[in-house]
Image: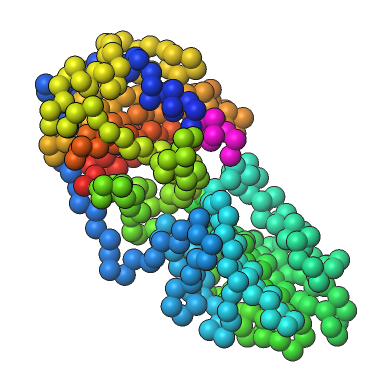
Amino acid sequence: MAKITRLTCLLAALTLSPRIQAGEPQSGDFDNPKRLSPRQSKIPAEAPPICDLRVKQPKLSPGNQFRCRGIPFEVTFPKAYIFEQHHGNGWLSWQHSPTGQVILLSVRAAAWTLYKNRWGEVDDYLPRLFKSLPGLISPEIGTPETVSIPGADFARKVGFSAGDAKTGTAGVSLSVIVKGWVMHLMITGKKGYPLRRGGAYSESILSSVKAVPRSAPVLHKFRNGMTVELPHDVWVSIEKDNKGLPNPTYMTAGDMTIIRVVEGKPIKPCDQLTQQDWNKIIGSVKNQPGQKGRILFGYSYWLDIGGIRSFWANADLPAHFSQETGRQRDPATATLMCHKNTLFQMFTVATRSTRRQLSKQVEAILVSFH
């Protein structure tokens, strides 16, 4: 998370830089901007709810089903069980501890350990978990086995037991990785209880685990009521900017693209802004790339999105995960639009994807602005 905090400082420098560049050949100038057609976001009626990773008590869906928009897992639990619910930065967990039984579900967004060593990410989970659960002393852990779950990138299951045969527990842990998300599910119970490994409830829960497509958008709502459609798998990594204002930073789970949105006030009403006014906002515009500090600026151009003027600037930042990706710089963009007397700024950094992929993603966000 420290690296993302540094990114916030770099993006702040990008915002205040006096030299944002212009002149990309295929793009528009101020009087003849590149025109994009706006697109209205549609959320299907059957879309699952958004499970906010910041709230203290996320809810299971009706029927005790874990089903969240943007998170590619589904799990159904016995209706008889009520869960304690927890949250953290990028993860959710549900836990139930009736006498002699435990269910724990933990879901979190991408971590680089997933990409460097997915076997270790999965197989090391259970020993770490046991250290946090009093009552499961000196467990015996079986040999992990790879299992098949349609649509999943990777899945492993392992059995375990703790205590003696009469009063001890026997359980199973299932870990699944899908498109940058990891889910850990642990179920255990004492002898004679349905959550014991091989018991009816335990088998029912395990068989309900599914990898599902992300089929509905996530919308960011600005304070004046405008919205933009963000990638389906975003989660909030930073809630407020360094001034304490509610300008969040998002991260996508699939490719770890960082998206920061900022609202501000223009120097005059949007429809009265001249090119000179815009230049005061974005800085003096040059026709060649330039560098300020560790930020390398690329070309920039003007957009018209359904009558809303927008400015787009390319940049490169030092790579945030150079050891993992092997590259020295990350492609980035800064965009600015003015509508309803509000300035909307968005900064994006692709820590794993290419410039072309990032541009396509940013354009899809911009045309959804309404």
- Closer to the camera in the image, 264 or 165: 264
Q: Position of residue 215 (x, y in %)?
A: 35, 59
Is residue 145 something that shows in the picture?
Answer: yes
Q: With respect to residue 233, does 72 lie above or below?
A: below
Q: Position of residue 185 (x, y in %)?
A: 62, 67
Residue at image location 66% in from the left, 51% down from the top: 121
- Closer to the camera in the image, 269 or 317: 269
Residue at image location 73% in from the left, 83% down from the top: 99
Q: With respect to residue 240, does 171 lie above or below?
A: below
The quarter of the displayed image where residue 187 is located:
bottom right
Residue 3 falls within the magenta-colored stretch: yes
Q: With respect to residue 126, does 201 lie above or below?
A: below
Return the residue found at the far bottom. 192
Q: With respect to residue 28, does 146 lie above or below?
A: below
Q: Which quarter of the figure is the N terminus placed in?
A: top right
Residue at image location 77% in from the left, 85% down from the top: 191
Q: How is the image coloured?
A: rainbow
Q: Position of residue 354 (x, y in %)?
A: 41, 32
> The magenta stretch spans which residues?
1-7
Is residue 197 something that shows in the picture?
Answer: no
- Closer to the camera in the image, 38 or 254: 38
- Closer to the camera in the image, 21 or 125: 21
Residue 356 falls within the magenta-colored stretch: no
